Image (cartoon, coloured by chain):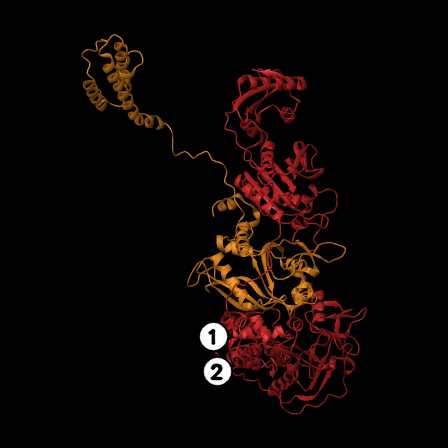
C-alpha cells in the first residue's frame, strides 16, 4: 500500500525525512520500502490502523514522541436529520450508521490540491464529491460512501440481509444476486453491499445536488463473506474486514463538512442522523507488571511504560501491581493484556531484550524407531551410490490410477493444475514423472530413491521408492552385462534387509504395477507391503520409457515395530579355512535359490559360508540344463580340518543334491 | 672351474664395477652371467666347490655363499628401475574404477543440519500428518473461520464429505498435536512438508518447514531471542547476527520476523537486496488462546514458537536460482550435492 511522504508529513510536527521514516516504520513492524517520493508498506492483517496517512503519522509520533498535527474540522453545530429513517436489522451486523444529508452540492471537478493528493497515490480523480470520500479513506482509513439522495426511495436507509430475488449492480458494472448478503437498502431495494461496494442505482453523477454521506461500522466477517463470494476486492472491503476506528467517526463527518464547505460554500448541511444501536465502549484491560516482566524477560521502567501507553492513548491509570487501561478505538486488535505487551515491546524495541538459552527440566526422550530406521535406510542407499529425490505429494489422476488398487484416490478440491490433482498413494507416480521428464532431456541414467508420506484411507504411511534407470538400450545392456536389471534392484533390497535385519520376504505374487515374472512382491509376514522389479508394460508405455528401468516401492511403517538387533559377537576361530568349489548341473527349471536353501538346510558340518559364484548355460552343457557353481567355506572352531573330513561332508551334500534335483557334478 | 685362484674380494670388486657400469638393456645379460641357473658364475662356483681341496672347503664355501648373496642382493636393488620400466605401460591418467557416489537431497542436508543442532540441545523431533483438518491447521492456532488469514486462495482443500480436510499450510498443527499428548516443560521441533497455492521461481505449491516450540514455566522472549541467535550462528557461521522486527501471526503474541545478517556481503548485495539483512523466519511467544485450545493454563505456562522455511535457507546456502530445481530431481542438479 502506497503512501505519499508529503501527505504523511502534514500530520507531524517536525516531520522526519523520508529516509528516517523508513527506519522508524520498519522498527515498529510496518514493513516499508521507499518508492519514489513515498512509502510502500506491506501491512500485516492486524494493522488497519496504519492503512491511512494519518495512521502512519501516528505510528511515527508514538515511536519518536513527536506531536501530531491534527487536521482541521468543521466545529459548528450539527442539526439532527429529520424526515429520514435509518435502521439496522441486527446491531451485531451494523452497530452504527451515520447519515449526513447535504444539499446544493455539485459533482464538479476536484480542486488541484485534491487531485494532486489522490494522483500522488495512484488514485483516479472522478468528481469532487466522490474524490472527497476517497480522500477521507486515505486520510483516516474509514471507508465512507456518497449516495445521490434523490435516488434513494422513501428517505430511508435500512441495513439488512437481501431477500430472495433481490439483485444489485455494483459500481464496477457487475450484476449480482444479493440474496442472503448484508446490504444497504432504501425503501425498495438494495443500493449497496454493506462495506464492500455501492450500487450503480444510487451513484453520484454530474446531476447530483443532494448527497447522503454514509459513515458506518459493519461486521467484519459479513463484509468478508460478501467480498469473497462476489469476488469484489475493494479498498472498503479490505479495511472493513480488518476493523475500523469507531472513536474517529464523528471527526470524519466534521472533516468532510469542513472540506466540502471550503470548496463549495453554497452547500447546505441539512443534518446528521447518527443511528448508534451499540455505542462503542473502550475495552478495559489490566496490565500486570509481573506478567509484563515475565513475558519479556526484562523490566521496562515505569516511566517508559506509562509514557508509551499514554502516547498510544491507553489512558493508563496506576493500580496495585500494574495499570488499568482503556484500549483506544483505533487499536482494533488490542483486547487482552498480552496484546498490550506486544504493543509496548513493539515500540520499545526488541533490542532491549536479553539473549538467553532456556534451562529446562523435563525430558525430550521418545523412542523413534521409524525415524531412526528411515535415516539408516537413507544413509545406506546414499552410501551405495543412489541419489535422494524429493517429488510432489500430488500427481495427475491418470498416472496415479495406473498404480491404484481400484479404490478412489484422494482428490484435491482446488488443485493448481491437472498434474497435481490427486494425493499419491505410492511414491512412484510423481517420481517417475520426474524420471520421464529428465530422460526426455537426455538424462537417462538415474539412480534415485525417495522416502516420504503417501496417503491411503485417511492414514499417511511412510514409503520408500527406488528407481534405477539405465543409459543403454535394453539389448545392448543385457548383452554386455549379462544380467537382468532386476538383479540390480534386488541387490539393493537384499542389502537393506541385511543392514537393518528386516524380516521381509520376497514372493512371486506382485502388486499390479509390476510385471510378473520380472518382479517380486515384498512381504512383511503375510502382508504385501510393496514390490520390486520391472514395471507393468502399460506403465512403461504411459511414461514412454525407452531405457531399461527397474523400481522398488514399499511401506516402511513396519519399522515402527522394528528394533535393530544388537550385534552379538561370536568367538573367532584361529583355525585355517578350507574352501571347496562344486558345480551342479541341473534342469533349467530348478531355481538356484531352492538349491542354495536345500544345501543350507542340510546343515553340513563346519560349513561357515556358502556362495553361489557361477550360473552357466550353454555349451558344452546339454540344452535345458544349467550349471550352478557353489563355493563352500569350511572351518572348525578348534582344530584344523583334514581333507578327508571335508570330502566326507561334500560327498553327503552331493548325494543329497543329486537325489533331490537329479544333479550331475560338472568337472 | 678351478677355485684355487678364486678370490672373494677381487670377485666382489669386479662384480660391483661391472654392475655399476652396466646399461639398463644389458642388465639382464649380466644377471644371467652371474645368476643364471645352469651356467651362471654362482652356479659354477657352487659346482666347483665339490671338487675343491678338502681343507679349503669351509672358507671357500663361506666366501662363495657371501658372494652369491651379495650378487643377489645387488640385482634385487636394481630391480625397481626394471619395475618402473614395466609399469610405464599403464596410462596413469585414466580414471579409476570407482563405485558411484550417492547424494543427499539439499533439503535434507539443510533439515539435518537444523535437527542435529536441536537434538543436541535436547529437543524432541515430532512428525505430523500432511493432510490436516481445520481445527489443527487453523482454529486451535487462533485463526477462526472469519479470520482474513483464512482466505481460501492459499489453501488446498481435499474432497471429502466432511469438507474439513485440507493440505496443511504450516507445520504448526504438529505443535497442537504435540501439546495434546505431552505435558510441559518440553522443547520440540517438527519438520515436514506444507502446501500453499502458489507457483513461481520463489514459491512452490509444496515446500518444507521446521517448526520449533518450547513450553515451560518462566519462558520469556529473551529465551526466544537467545535460542534463535545461537541457531543462526550454527546455520550461518560464527559471525551471523540476527535482528527482530515486530510482526503478526495469529498464534503468537508478541510476534516477530527474524532477519539474519547477510552471509554473502558486508555492505549490501543482490541477495540481501542491499539491506545486509535476509529475512529467514517468523516467531513469537505462544498466544494464550493456543494454550487454552490444548488445555494448558496460560497463567502457569509460557512458551515460544518459531517456523522456518527450509527451501529458503537451502536456496540461500547453495545459491539455488529456482525453487523448482528442488523437485525436478534432475541428475545435473543432484550431482552438485555429492559434495558438502
Q: Is residue A521 left or right of residue B46?
A: right
Please identify the quarter of the rendering in which residue A557 is found: top right
Q: Identify the residue position indicated by label 1 in the image.
A: A20
Q: Position of residue B191 (x, y in %)?
A: 59, 54
> Which residue is outermost to the bottom?
A77
Is A481 or A145 nearer to us in this picture? Answer: A481
Q: Identify the residue position indicated by label 2 in the image.
A: A14
Is A180 or A564 nearer to us in this picture? Answer: A564
Is B109 or A481 nearer to us in this picture? Answer: B109
The chain painted orange is B
- C-alpha gap between disc 2 and disc 1: 12 Å
Q: Is residue A541 left or right of residue B44?
A: right
For the residues bearing labels 2 and 1, Cβ distance under 8 angstroms? no
- Mark 2 or mark 1: whose residue is earlier in sequence: 2
- Mark 1: few/some/many CA within 10 Å (<14, 14-19, 20+): few
Report helix, strand or loop for mark 1. Answer: helix
Q: Colour of chain A?
A: red
User: Given the image, what chain letter belongs to the residue carrying mark 1?
Assistant: A
Q: Position of residue A254 (x, y in %)?
A: 64, 86
- Mark 2: few/some/many CA within 10 Å (<14, 14-19, 20+): few
* Quarter of the N terminus of chain A within the rendering: bottom right
Vertical comparison of A435 with A155: above or below: above
Instruction: Evaluate whether residue A48 shows in this view.
Output: no
Report helix, strand or loop for mark 2. Answer: loop
> Which residue is outermost to the top?
B51
Amino acid at each position: 500500500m502506497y503512501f505519499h511522504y508529503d501527505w504523511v508529513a502534514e500530520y507531524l510536527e517536525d516531520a522526519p525525512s523520508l529516509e528516517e521514516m523508513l527506519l522508524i516504520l520498519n522498527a515498529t513492524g510496518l514493513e516499508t520500502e521507499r518508492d519514489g517520493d513515498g512509502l510502500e508498506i506491506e501491512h500485516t492483517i492486524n494493522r488497519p490502523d496504519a492503512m491511512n496517512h494519518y495512521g502512519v503519522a501516528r505510528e511515527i509520533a508514538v515511536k519518536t514522541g513527536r506531536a501530531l498535527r491534527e487536521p482541521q474540522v468543521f466545529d459548528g453545530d450539527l442539526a439532527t436529520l429529520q424526515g429520514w429513517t435509518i435502521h439496522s436489522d441486527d446491531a451485531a451486523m451494523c452497530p452504527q450508521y451515520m447519515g449526513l444529508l447535504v444539499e446544493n452540492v455539485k459533482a464538479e471537478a476536484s480542486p488541484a490540491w485534491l487531485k494532486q493528493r489522490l494522483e500522488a497515490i495512484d488514485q483516479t480523480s472522478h468528481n469532487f464529491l466522490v474524490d472527497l470520500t476517497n480522500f477521507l479513506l486515505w486520510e483516516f482509513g474509514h471507508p465512507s460512501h456518497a449516495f445521490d439522495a434523490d435516488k434513494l426511495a422513501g428517505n430511508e436507509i435500512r441495513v439488512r440481509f437481501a431477500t430472495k430475488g433481490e439483485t444489485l449492480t455494483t459500481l464496477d458494472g457487475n450484476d449480482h444476486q444479493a440474496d442472503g448478503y448484508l446490504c444497504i437498502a432504501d425503501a425498495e431495494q438494495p443500493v449497496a453491499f454493506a462495506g464492500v461496494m455501492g450500487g450503480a442505482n444510487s451513484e453520484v453523477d454530474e446531476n447530483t445536488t443532494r448527497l447522503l454521506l454514509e459513515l458506518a461500522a459493519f461486521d467484519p466477517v459479513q463484509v468478508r463473506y460478501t467480498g469473497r463470494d462476489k469476488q469484489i476486492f475493494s479498498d472498503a472491503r479490505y479495511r472493513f474486514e480488518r476493523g475500523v476506528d469507531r472513536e474517529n467517526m464523528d471527526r470524519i463527518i466534521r472533516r468532510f463538512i469542513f472540506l466540502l464547505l471550503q470548496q463549495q460554500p453554497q452547500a447546505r448541511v441539512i443534518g446528521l442522523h447518527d443511528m448508534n444501536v451499540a455505542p462503542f465502549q473502550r475495552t478495559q484491560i489490566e496490565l500486570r507488571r509481573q506478567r509484563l516482566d515475565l513475558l519479556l524477560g526484562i523490566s521496562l521502567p515505569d516511566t517508559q511504560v506509562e509514557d508509551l501507553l499514554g502516547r498510544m492513548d491507553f489512558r493508563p491509570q496506576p493500580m496495585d501491581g500494574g495499570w488499568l487501561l482503556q484500549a483506544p478505538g483505533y487499536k482494533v486488535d488490542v483486547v487482552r493484556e498480552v496484546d498490550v505487551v506486544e504493543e509496548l515491546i513493539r515500540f520499545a524495541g526488541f533490542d532491549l531484550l536479553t539473549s538467553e538459552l532456556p534451562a529446562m527440566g523435563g525430558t525430550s526422550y521418545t523412542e523413534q524407531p521409524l525415524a531412526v530406521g528411515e535415516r539408516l535406510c537413507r544413509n545406506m542407499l546414499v552410501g551405495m551410490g543412489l541419489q535422494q529425490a524429493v517429488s510432489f505429494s500430488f500427481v495427475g489422476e491418470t498416472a496415479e490410477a495406473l498404480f491404484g488398487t481400484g479404490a478412489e484416490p484422494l482428490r484435491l478440491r482446488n488443485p493448481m493444475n491437472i498434474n497435481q490433482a490427486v494425493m499419491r498413494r505410492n511414491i512412484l507416480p510423481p517420481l517417475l514423472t520426474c524420471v520421464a521428464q529428465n530422460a526426455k532431456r537426455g538424462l537417462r541414467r538415474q539412480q534415485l530413491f525417495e522416502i516420504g508420506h503417501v496417503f491411503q484411507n485417511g492414514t499417511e504411511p511412510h514409503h520408500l521408492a527406488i528407481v534405477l534407470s539405465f543409459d543403454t538400450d535394453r539389448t545392448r545392456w543385457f548383452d554386455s552385462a549379462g544380467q537382468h536389471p532386476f538383479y540390480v534392484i534386488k541387490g539393493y533390497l537384499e542389502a537393506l534387509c541385511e543392514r537393518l535385519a528386516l524380516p521381509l520376504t520376497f514372493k512371486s505374487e506382485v502388486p499390479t504395477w509390476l510385471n510378473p515374472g520380472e518382479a517380486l512382491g515384498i512381504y512383511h509376514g503375510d502382508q504385501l507391503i510393496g514390490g520390486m522389479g520391472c514395471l507393468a508394460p502399460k506403465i512403461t508405455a504411459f511414461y514412454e520409457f525407452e531405457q531399461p528401468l527397474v523400481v522398488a516401492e514399499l511401506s516402511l511403517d513396519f519399522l515402527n515395530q522394528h528394533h535393530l538387533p544388537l550385534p552379538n559377537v561370536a568367538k573367532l576361530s584361529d583355525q585355517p579355512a578350507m574352501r571347496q568349489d562344486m558345480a551342479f548341473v541341473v534342469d533349467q527349471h530348478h531355481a538356484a535359490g531352492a538349491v542354495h536353501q536345500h544345501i543350507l538346510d542340510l546343515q553340513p558340518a563346519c560349513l561357515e559360508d556358502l556362495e553361489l559364484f557361477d550360473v552357466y548355460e550353454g555349451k558344452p552343457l546339454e540344452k535345458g540344463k544349467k550349471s550352478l557353481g557353489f563355493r563352500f567355506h569350511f572351518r572348525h572352531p578348534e582344530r584344523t580340518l583334514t581333507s578327508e573330513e571335508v570330502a566326507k561332508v561334500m560327498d553327503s551334500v552331493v548325494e543329497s543334491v543329486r537325489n533331490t534335483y537329479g544333479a550331475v557334478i560338472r568337472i | 672351474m678351478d677355485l684355487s685362484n678364486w678370490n672373494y674380494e677381487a670377485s666382489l670388486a669386479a662384480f660391483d664395477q661391472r654392475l655399476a657400469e652396466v646399461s639398463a638393456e644389458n642388465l639382464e645379460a649380466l644377471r644371467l652371467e652371474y645368476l643364471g641357473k645352469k651356467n651362471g658364475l654362482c652356479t659354477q662356483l657352487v659346482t666347483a666347490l665339490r671338487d675343491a681341496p678338502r681343507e679349503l672347503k669351509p672358507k671357500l664355501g663361506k666366501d662363495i655363499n657371501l658372494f652369491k648373496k651379495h650378487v643377489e642382493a645387488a640385482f634385487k636393488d636394481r630391480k625397481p628401475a626394471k619395475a618402473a620400466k614395466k609399469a610405464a605401460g599403464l596410462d596413469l591418467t585414466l580414471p579409476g574404477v570407482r563405485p558411484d557416489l550417492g547424494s543427499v537431497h539439499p533439503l535434507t542436508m539443510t533439515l539435518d543440519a537444523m535437527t542435529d543442532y536441536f537434538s543436541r540441545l535436547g529437543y524432541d523431533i515430532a512428525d505430523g500428518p500432511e493432510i490436516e483438518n481445520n481445527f489443527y491447521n487453523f482454529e486451535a492456532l487462533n485463526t477462526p473461520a472469519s479470520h482474513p488469514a483464512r482466505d481460501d486462495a492459499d489453501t488446498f482443500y481435499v474432497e471429502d464429505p466432511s469438507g474439513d480436510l485440507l493440505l496443511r499450510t504450516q507445520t504448526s498443527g504438529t505443535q497442537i498435536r504435540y501439546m495434546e499428548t505431552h505435558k510441559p516443560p518440553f522443547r520440540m521441533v517438527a519438520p515436514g512438508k506444507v502446501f500453499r497455492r502458489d507457483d513461481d521461481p520463489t514459491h512452490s505449491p509444496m515446500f518444507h518447514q521446521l517448526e520449533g516450540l518450547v513450553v515451560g514455566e518462566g519462558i520469556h522472549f529473551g529465551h526466544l531471542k537467545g535460542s534463535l541467535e545461537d541457531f543462526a550462528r550454527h546455520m550461518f557461521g560464527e559471525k551471523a547476527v540476527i535482528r527482530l522486527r515486530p510482526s503478526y501471526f495469529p498464534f503468537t503474541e508478541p510476534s516477530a520476523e527474524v532477519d539474519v545478517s547477510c552471509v554473502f556481503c558486508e555492505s549490501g548485495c543482490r541477495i540481501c537486496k542491499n539491506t545486509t539483512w535476509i529475512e529467514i523466519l517468523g516467531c513469537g511467544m505462544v498466544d494464550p488462546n493456543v494454550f487454552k485450545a490444548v488445555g494448558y493454563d496460560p497463567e502457569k505456562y509460557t512458551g515460544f514458537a518459531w517456523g522456518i522455511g527450509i527451501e529458503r535457507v537451502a536456496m540461500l546456502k547453495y545459491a539455488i536460482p529456482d525453487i523448482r530445481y528442488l523437485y525436478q530431481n534432475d541428475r545435473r542438479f543432484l550431482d552438485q550435492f555429492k559434495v558438502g
